[in-house]
Image (cartoon, helix red, strand yellow):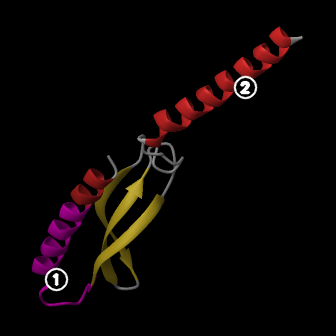
Amino acid sequence: MAWLETLVVLAVIVLVGSAAYTVIRGAGKPRQSAIGTNSRWVATHYAVSGATRVVVRRVRPDLRGGLDEHIIMQIPDSDSDFESKYLEAMAQARARAALFELESE
């Protein structure tokens, strides 16, 4: 009977040790959500109600459309300084996309 109690105690110790090891081993690893898997940030633009919207969009190749979007600037198409504002906004969008990519690694 004593050997059975010893065996049960050893089994409990092994189970607790295994669970602790699993928790400790997984604690340092960042968790990736299903959204973050194989996604990337891109700078893009599109027309909306007589204006051009420059955005940074999180996309995934297997999904249509964006997962997340940050507006950098919306420029009226009639703006006399449209080209320089557009180029500035796209540069900001590319920089922001690069920053988001670094943060998501």
In the picture of the structure, the residue carrying the numbered disc 2 is 12
| Residue 93: % across, % down | 23, 67
| Front residue of this view, candidates 97 and 91 | 97
Q: Position of residue 94 (x, y in %)?
A: 20, 61
Q: Which mark is residue 19?
A: none
Q: Vertical placement of 23 versus 68: above or below?
A: above
Which residue sits at x=46%, y=59%? 66
Residue type for callout 2:
Val
Q: Is residue 6 magenta?
A: no
Residue shown at 48% from the left, 45% from the top: 31
Q: Secondary structure at mark 2?
A: helix
Q: Which residues are magenta?
A: 75-96
What amino acid type should be assigned to the residue bearing mark 1?
Phe
* Residue nearer the viewer, 11 or 3: 3
Q: CA distance from mark 2 to mark 1?
A: 71 Å
Name the main secondary structure of what is drawn in magenta: helix
Q: Quadrant of residue 52?
A: bottom left
Quadrant position of the N terminus in the picture: top right
Q: How many marks?
A: 2
* Callout 1 secondary element: helix
Q: Residues within 10 Å of mark 1 (few under 14, many from 20)?
A: some
| Residue shown at 34% from the left, 51% from the top | 104
The residue that label 1 is drawn on is 82
